[in-house]
Amino acid sequence: MNRRANGIHPWANHPELLTSIRSPWDKFRKADWNFGRYEDAILARPCDAEAVVYTALDFCVAIVALRDWTKKTLTRDVRSGAKTLPTGMAAIDDFVRWVERRVPWQSAIEAIANTIKHADYRDKGWEKGTAMVASFVPGPLQARKDACADGLELFGFMHEHSDVAWWDIALRQVPSPDAEPGYVAFGDALDEWRAILDQFGYIVE
């Protein structure tokens, strides 16, 4: 017996049956939880670079999923007349571009998420972007870190100062020498997503 009518599964509107998540706010809380795990990894001493990378990747995937959940919910609410499109969004099809303009580092986050999901480099919207693990130290140690002759010496230096040194993701677009720590970029993106959900009336506390 075919469980689908017109190609639509009868449970199509019940994603909670597979996820326990019912709304964009639930999805935001999941992304916030992912950011917390990433934050814990950065603040751990000694700091495990692998934990930092893995939790950063999980956060990026969660943010892209949050975008998808929000778009689907807003689409339904606009069509039913319960919501109106925000300023700067002429049609619901403009949602992704609207988000990219609104959320700091959204394009970078999406490039990272698409690459980790699809196993090839996908930088659409963030061309020649890199998200590489980088070392960080308190100010008084910066000159000694900069003086390390090579990667081997740097790793030794980081091990020696593992009680205060840490790893993070450095977001950069080649050939620019400027990089933004993931902690700043991802935190700013999460804050703006909360503001978006607040604007749409999707926060439930």
Image (cartoon, grey):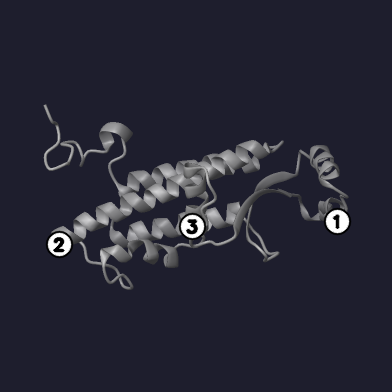
Identify residue for label 1: 143
Which residue type does callout 3 highlight?
Ala
Q: Are marks 2 and 1 in contact (CB under 8 Å)?
A: no
Name which of mark 3 and mark 2 comes first in the sequence: 2
Query: Which quadrant holds the N terminus?
Result: top left
Identify residue for label 2: 81
Which residue type does callout 1 highlight?
Ala
Q: Is residue 203 visible?
A: no
Q: Residue at x 31, y 39 (%)?
A: 21
Structural crowding at the residue carrying mark 3, measured as other residues with C-alpha within 10 Å and reported as few (<14), some (14–19) or many (≥20)? some
Query: Please, what secondary structure does the residue beneath circle 2 have?
Result: loop
Can you give x and y, in whole percent of width and height, for residue 13 in the image? 20, 42
Label 1 and label 3: CA atoms lie apart by 31 Å
Query: Please, what secondary structure does the residue beneath circle 3 have?
Result: helix
Left or right side of 102 for 48: right
Q: Residue at x 60, y 42 (%)?
A: 53
Q: Residue at x 43, y 63 (%)?
A: 100
Query: Please, what secondary structure does the residue beneath circle 1 have?
Result: helix
Name which of mark 2 and mark 1 comes first in the sequence: 2
Can you give x and y, in whole percent of width and height, for residue 19 in the image? 32, 35
Can you give x and y, in whole percent of width and height, for residue 132 in the image? 65, 50
Label 3 and label 2: CA atoms lie apart by 29 Å
Q: What is the tally of numbered marks visible in this picture?
A: 3
Near-viewer residue (73 or 35):
73
Left or right side of 69 for 33: right
Name which of mark 1 and mark 3 comes first in the sequence: 1
Q: Residue at x 17, y 41 (%)?
A: 8
